[in-house]
Amino acid sequence: MRIERAALAAVCLLASTLAIAADKPRARDLGVPFDGTPGPLNAITDVAGVAVGQVTLIQGEGKLVVGKGPVRTGVTAILPRGRGSLDDPVFAGAFALNGAGEMTGTTWVEESGFLEGPVMITNTHSVGAVHEGTIAWRVAQAGPDPTGYWWSNPVVAETWDGELNDINGFHVRPAHAGQALSSAKPGPVAEGSVGGGTGMVCFGFKGGIGTASRVLPAKAGGYTVGALVQCNCGRKADLRIAGAPVGREIAGSGTRDEDSGSIIIVVATDAPLLPHQLKRVARRVSMGLARDGSISGNGSGDIFIAFSTANPGAAKPTGVAALSDLPNDRMDPLFAATVQAVEEAIVNAMVGAETMKGANDVVVRALPHDELQRILKRYGRLPAP
Amino acid sequence: MRIERAALAAVCLLASTLAIAADKPRARDLGVPFDGTPGPLNAITDVAGVAVGQVTLIQGEGKLVVGKGPVRTGVTAILPRGRGSLDDPVFAGAFALNGAGEMTGTTWVEESGFLEGPVMITNTHSVGAVHEGTIAWRVAQAGPDPTGYWWSNPVVAETWDGELNDINGFHVRPAHAGQALSSAKPGPVAEGSVGGGTGMVCFGFKGGIGTASRVLPAKAGGYTVGALVQCNCGRKADLRIAGAPVGREIAGSGTRDEDSGSIIIVVATDAPLLPHQLKRVARRVSMGLARDGSISGNGSGDIFIAFSTANPGAAKPTGVAALSDLPNDRMDPLFAATVQAVEEAIVNAMVGAETMKGANDVVVRALPHDELQRILKRYGRLPAP
Amino acid sequence: MRIERAALAAVCLLASTLAIAADKPRARDLGVPFDGTPGPLNAITDVAGVAVGQVTLIQGEGKLVVGKGPVRTGVTAILPRGRGSLDDPVFAGAFALNGAGEMTGTTWVEESGFLEGPVMITNTHSVGAVHEGTIAWRVAQAGPDPTGYWWSNPVVAETWDGELNDINGFHVRPAHAGQALSSAKPGPVAEGSVGGGTGMVCFGFKGGIGTASRVLPAKAGGYTVGALVQCNCGRKADLRIAGAPVGREIAGSGTRDEDSGSIIIVVATDAPLLPHQLKRVARRVSMGLARDGSISGNGSGDIFIAFSTANPGAAKPTGVAALSDLPNDRMDPLFAATVQAVEEAIVNAMVGAETMKGANDVVVRALPHDELQRILKRYGRLPAP
Amino acid sequence: MRIERAALAAVCLLASTLAIAADKPRARDLGVPFDGTPGPLNAITDVAGVAVGQVTLIQGEGKLVVGKGPVRTGVTAILPRGRGSLDDPVFAGAFALNGAGEMTGTTWVEESGFLEGPVMITNTHSVGAVHEGTIAWRVAQAGPDPTGYWWSNPVVAETWDGELNDINGFHVRPAHAGQALSSAKPGPVAEGSVGGGTGMVCFGFKGGIGTASRVLPAKAGGYTVGALVQCNCGRKADLRIAGAPVGREIAGSGTRDEDSGSIIIVVATDAPLLPHQLKRVARRVSMGLARDGSISGNGSGDIFIAFSTANPGAAKPTGVAALSDLPNDRMDPLFAATVQAVEEAIVNAMVGAETMKGANDVVVRALPHDELQRILKRYGRLPAP
């Protein structure tokens, strides 16, 4: 392999939580109207137990030399039950709206109904390193699975950051996955160009990680739904925010002419749903994405996974498990919350990102906040001046 | 069976094409802005060869007596290659965004890649009658299938019209399916409360049948994409048209508190797509539906089928078939056209419907055209006065 | 429609249970060795609550005249919870090994995880009549569904009996479905040429309905698994019984040169399985079928459904349901039982059938019991003389 | 990470083709009867263009020390069009009979219809290393994909060798994937304990890699079907060979009490099949596996992929592709060939393996050839002495 790894030592590891500037606005702070009631953090971590860890790798500038950089990439880890995730799988369901991408481990999610560990997100060519690193971390942190075997089949997803990042340089190493996992915690989640989302492009603007949540009314069970996206999809011309054709109204061209990126979306809830019901939730993710204007282009790997933190202990291999289940007839508020949280999380990914210069001096500009507000006013979505 | 069939003789059979009033406006006539370029008819019949036939059953008023009426229902038939559909199957693919409904025959579509005959749409409890009637019509019209067998496995879909129609009265008979098929023709397609859509409710307003089409630029192949919907889904509060929250802005309540209806959507194209590519198209239908505000409620049977009229003769059982195929990398314009045509066809179903009084004097009001225009102006989607 | 229905009045309705001759041997009675321990009846009705009803239509001889006969067909109804099936859906999962056939209602089974009513099996062209008749029977017998709607989406499956039966004559009427349902009961199940299986052909010999069951050891939970098949699939040359190449060893040709029939297989269990686990069970059905030699030919609609009678009340639309679930790690005995019961049920269908003469004097011969025993001896599967 | 990599340098790299001893018998050489006509090599490489490369890693003995060994593992690479595989994808379809395992890249196979590169098989915890190594090899060997992007989403499958191998030691490195790929060639394929199959256990005996092929008669098109398995599944008690209960008849216990391994099966053909037809082929693999006695246990990752080398150039992104397609009605001989080749390839994997001692001195014994022959005689499958 022609890849030089020595350079890696110098890679700047940014603890992603440092990137949560106290005064950095989110979409809602700009007045963008969304439906539904968010949780306290308006983040996937509003679902109790969910922990997020991110490792951001940014190093070098200028001309791309494979194996040397520039590096603009990283890893995002979502642990459904924090550290308990390794010993207590969660019910889960996945859906590929357009499978032009990878989310390993979903064959077992589909078969077993369980997500056994974290969801990891990185760049396309680092799936392998993160896969190995996630297994290695588990071997180091925990014991064998409930049947006594050391058997790991991790869920690792990706989007493609080859415009800004030396993607063929394999700068994400297995240890970075472990660092993302070890740093995972509840609380606010950094958005924009962090973690796996560091080098991503969303509807032609700088994208990356975004999150949002919804809390249902008590009569609907009071459940929380949270979404986290690694947004790297869409064309500028297609971008709609709050129903307004924002992409077309902003002058200039966007990065990419085609809808050729990808978007990975993770939905968490504490509602007691069974695996087949979580697949239903995962399918609704499409509709939140569509509200922002996507047509799910041929090259866009639009892959979604939903899990429920309810029913701890459901996977233990002895006896008969006692479970709770929310009947299908009560799922509509969860479907609506999913669509709404996804719609907002994508906008948060763009609003939270700043203009970035990457490999070969390619520049991806951030969504201009003032332009966004101006357009929303024109389309009756913000009070006119 | 307690059902009285004698009453049927008097059912008023309306040739649905008569219902195409020359001056009845469609969504586009009201100024609703949509993306893309429609074909000459802005209908599924812009795809050469596609024929549509509809039988509308309207009889009786007042209190519902099972088996007597009132009757507000019908049958819509879509023939991919007109009369040639029985001898020359088309490649097809189906997708259930939310499978709370029926589209018979899709197991074979999925397995074989072919749609062997028409797509029929009716009410939920008339699937059986239309199924039998479609087979009987084939037996009467054509010969056995290419392998020499008389084997029919028709595609029959449904939505539920139990608010307005005596759905347990089984007023659709097998012969009505035959009438819809025999009357199928190219040209304009009646919209609103006709055919299978006669008794349907869409986003709280009167719905039913709607259609639209898109023509791709020559550089994208010049292909045509057409959509036909039988819209019976959605909540009033969720309705968005051209990005504006039309449902909330219109005063009063809508029929149904829940997103409990269904929507059947048929997409036709002349682009040379293989079965797995047509499934890709069918999945994009979700995104057009989402643009109009749907969250695909638990009880909403949102089932889609896409077919291609290209590659005639592909199913013949001898030799090796020579096929054409549009590469995946050229599919984006078809995806966009699908989303756009579906988005518009749904609005056409509502704009084309008139207020209807049905069983037990239930009234479902039409979407008020003037209110729609007023709201679009407020949201910057129509020129302000 | 050219079909004459008057002739129907004279169709001989055979109460299928009459056909259970006290001394009619089953496969096991002939010494065919199978793995596992059957239940008391060695039938799907060993699963408590399961009721089976069959209507057999046999009338006429000689030359086929469409609409006149000869008639060799019928309806088989399986009610998961007997009459309680309409008010209390069971968890279920379906799988199409080869979807060249029909099982209506499975889109909703997949979506909701529930089978809401019976599984009906008939001939290919009578799906419509049975669909309507099943809804009509429900309307007559029970109230609306738990959400207050009259909404029925019945599961109706089929195989093709066009060699022996006037399949284009539509001799099964909606009322026959009601009769099968009303006559459903626990206890022994008639096998061979009865109910929906009346005119069927299995591995070139006379087939039809067959059933078998397995009871797990107490340490595996003591659960029961039952299978019922409507066998109309396979080529004579492919038939293997207990591993011996029975089809090739029996002289003469079989009916059909191709594997062009179909087989519908229903699996019932009282093990507390969730919908995604029942899909796992349904996939194992393929392996039981394979043990009898099938290669699942292109034209063979090999469609399977599995349901669990555990967890009554799971579908009620209020509150949160309390469920039991057998962990995945304990499912292997259920998988083995499914494979074994299916393998035996198919052989029972053949052993239970007698030679039949049908339309145009076509004769389908029964599997000769003495030949079967002779071959099993030769292949070390029965004690040699 | 606690893993010591230094030890790797000394790992014994065995060129797997050396392992093809001229006189090593295969199942057929022992007289095991199988249906159908094999190709000249009775291997997947009978399909023109298919190349196979294997790297076998065997090092150390005695007590397991994580990261030190003992090592009993490897990598097997299947290139559909040899080196041309990177520039010219093949149509493909995949199926998971039981998804308790991993085959990365199948989401894109399902979506696009194409397999874009090799199929790689290794042990469970080395998926990541092989994933990275496969991308690195492509970057080194070839250019970007047809759209100009460097985007790799490789297909990497696995089975679990943790009894014999230090699976948590990550002894397979990315470079091993490249070596397997670079050494890939047409011709005979080593069987048994080689490549990815080095440490595998099959029906309680030593398993690993096996292969077989079938050639259709000219009237059926003369096509070739080849299968390659990495067999690590099954319980001894379930093993059937040629219909005889071989597993039970051989005294002693097998490795593993449960059907907890996995089997990866790759099917190649030169028949011109479309992606949905290749999924049909992949589903038939289940039936070949079932013939050898498997019930596809809960923990067995039984994942299959089928590809066709016909239609070169189908993926090029410009214009309209001209394709050939074998009609569905002509597929039965391919289905039969698939079932037969899979059935034989599994037996070949066992017959080709020798007893192995691995980590902690665990010994997995080979299937005794003489016992196998003795049992086949008893069951009438070999001429009695």
Image (cartoon, coloured by chain):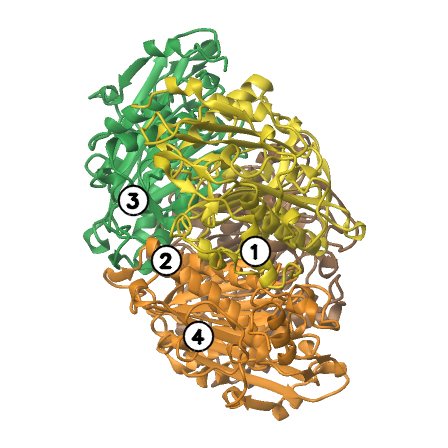
Chain colours: A yellow, B orange, C brown, D green
Indicate the chain on which mark 4 is placed: B
> Which residue is denoted by mark 2 in the rendering?
B331
Q: Earlier in the sequence, mark 2 or mark 4?
A: 4
Q: Position of residue B184 (x, y in %)?
A: 44, 83
Q: Nearer the viewer, mark 2 or mark 4?
A: 2
> Which residue is denoted by mark 4 in the rendering?
B44
Which residue type does callout 3 highlight? Answer: Gly
Label 4 environment density (alpha carbons within 10 Å; few <14, some 14–19, many ≥20): many
Q: Which residue is found at the position 57% from the left and 35% from the top?
A: C332
Which residue type does callout 4 highlight? Answer: Ile
Q: Nearer the viewer, residue B385 or D317?
A: B385
Does residue A292 appear left or right of residue D109 in this picture?
right
> Which residue is denoted by mark 3 in the rendering?
D148
Badge 2 vs badge 4, beta-carbon distance below 8 Å: no
Q: Are the numbered discs 1 and 4 placed on the same chain, yes or no? A: no
Label 2 and label 1: CA atoms lie apart by: 25 Å
Label 2 environment density (alpha carbons within 10 Å; few <14, some 14–19, many ≥20): many
Q: Are the numbered discs 3 and 1 placed on the same chain, yes or no? A: no
Q: Which residue is found at the position 47% from the left and 42% from the top?
A: D97
Element at label 2: loop
Label 3 and label 4: CA atoms lie apart by: 36 Å
Q: Are the numbered discs 3 and 2 placed on the same chain, yes or no? A: no
Which quadrant: the N terminus of chain A?
Answer: top left
| Whether residue D160 can be seen here | no
Which residue type does callout 1 highlight? Answer: Ile
Label 3 and label 1: CA atoms lie apart by: 31 Å
Element at label 1: loop
Label 1 and label 4: CA atoms lie apart by: 30 Å
Does residue C311 appear left or right of residue B9 in this picture?
right
